[in-house]
Amino acid sequence: MAEPLGTERLYTAAQTRELDRCAIQDHRIPGIALMSRAARAAFDCLLQTWPEVECVQVLCGTGNNGGDGFLIADLAHKRGIPTTVLQVGDPGRISGDALLARQQALANGVKITPFSTSPLLRLGVIVDAMLGTGLGGEVRDDYREAIATVNGNSAPVLAVDIPSGLCSDTGRVLGLAVRADLTVTFIGLKRGLFSLAAADHTGAIEFNDLGVPPEVYAQVDCDSYRLELEYLLERLPARPATAHKGLYGTVLVVGGDYGMAGAAALAAEAALRCGAGLVKVATRAGHVAALVARTPEAMPVGVRSGQELAPLVESADVLVVGPGLGQSPWSEQLLQAAAASGKPMVLDADGLNLLAAGRGIAPDRRDNWVLTPHPGEAARLLGSSTAQVQADRFAAVRQLQQRYGGVAMLKGNGSLVTDGAQLLLSDYGNPGMASGGMGDVLSGVIGSLLAQHMPALEATALGVCLHGAAADRAAEQGQRGLLASDLVPHMRTLLG
């Protein structure tokens, strides 16, 4: 596999269990020692975050996550902090290292009572050590009641490893999940902490590898990574003093059917601001004057058919097809002409919808395109439903790439990018991005980076991070009312 573009590995629950196994069996680190390190790491984070904590209330399940909780309670008790453990689930099911941890806490004077008979106080810090990463199905009734009680309490919450009820593989809520203020996770970053509903449940995320040696990580295969904008920006070559526009490519934006000129304009402006040498726009003739008035550096041309598009396609290095394209016969002709050229292409919006419907272009595989659907478009491309796509976004983006080739992206909270070898996650961005035109800007960014000779996976990874980070900067003035055009000046600044 090529050098990973992400800087942090993301693991499934099964891979994390394998890391545990390798550390314990192959490298002779006792399980109770790892549990003790996890408890210490979580307790230290608790004190750093809430240094004046009045009391600690720990909800413990019956597995190893509960074991971490017992030892956290033991540390708090030794510190002289009033501490209570509330046992969720049948204590007769506790075994192994978790049982050792429970016995240690009891021997040191920690009070453990059944959750069902002990109400939570509305003070101090609540520690969620109930379910961890082993949850495979919907939360059962006793845990559901405990989670609901935690969420209804005003005290801050620290989640141990992962908020109970959150799927560590997908970020999906399994019926009900704890809403934490801080999550302290161990050994491997779980990919579900950064996807789908996770941001509403994790709070701040702290990671501790518990002193597991690098040799353990080398034993467990991992192809999923979390992206870092700074690392990707470092890979962007500096411009030589002899630079000219011919070095940085020509992008052709194809779109802007009646009533949708703004989408093509946003894509074109984003492509220019991210460094493309030239940007042309093939659109309806009636939109040309407006596009020139908005962005005189772009070169809009009115086209009536695919035949008229052909000369523009010939002069372009990269095509961005879909912003405001519509689904009319005109739209189909333009998509057909663009696809027939064989040029590198970013396909977005109605370009994707036409592809899914087999209109204007056959739904086959290509090596030199980037597909950028949101979950609804992805569902149409896969012949499934939006709910199915969102149930496992990691599987969905892999299926998109396997079916259509090239580079596939799945937009959303924790946007995903894959070329079939690496799966990359960007957790930049914020809820203010839930407004029209954001995808048009993103397609222009990716097209611009492709025109500047970046490999497709790298261009897509940098584009999605840049897009989200610019939105985060723009949202410093407020998320509500954030516009797609607000991102453009911040992207230019970030690219420097």
Image (tube, rainbow, N blue to C red):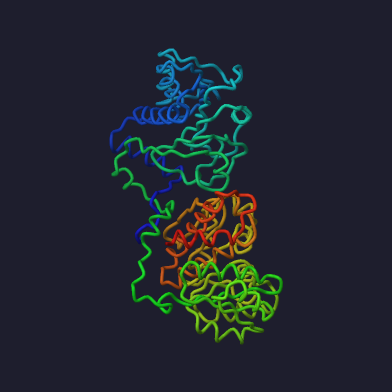
Instruction: Indicate whether 226 appears above or below 20.
Output: below
**Viewer-nearest residue: 492 or 90:** 492
Q: Looking at the rendering, which quadrant does residue 457 occupy?
A: bottom left
**Viewer-nearest residue: 417 or 386:** 417
> Residue 430: x percent and y percent?
56, 50
> Residue 364: x percent and y percent?
55, 72
> Residue 185: x percent and y percent?
44, 37
Is residue 494 something one can see in this rendering?
yes
**Viewer-nearest residue: 318 or 109:** 318
Is residue 383 something one can see in this rendering?
no
Classify the position of the N terminus by image quarter: bottom left
> Residue 460: x percent and y percent?
47, 63
Q: Looking at the rendering, which quadrant does residue 348 occupy?
A: bottom right
Q: Residue at x 55, y 83 (%)?
A: 312
Q: Looking at the rendering, which quadrant does residue 68 occupy?
A: top left
* Number of numbered labels in the structure image: 0
Classify the position of the C terminus by image quarter: bottom left
Is 212 placed left or right of 465 in the picture?
A: left
Instruction: Indicate whether 266 appears above or below 215.
Output: below
Q: Residue at x 50, y 42 (%)?
A: 168
Is 254 placed left or right of 416 in the picture?
A: right
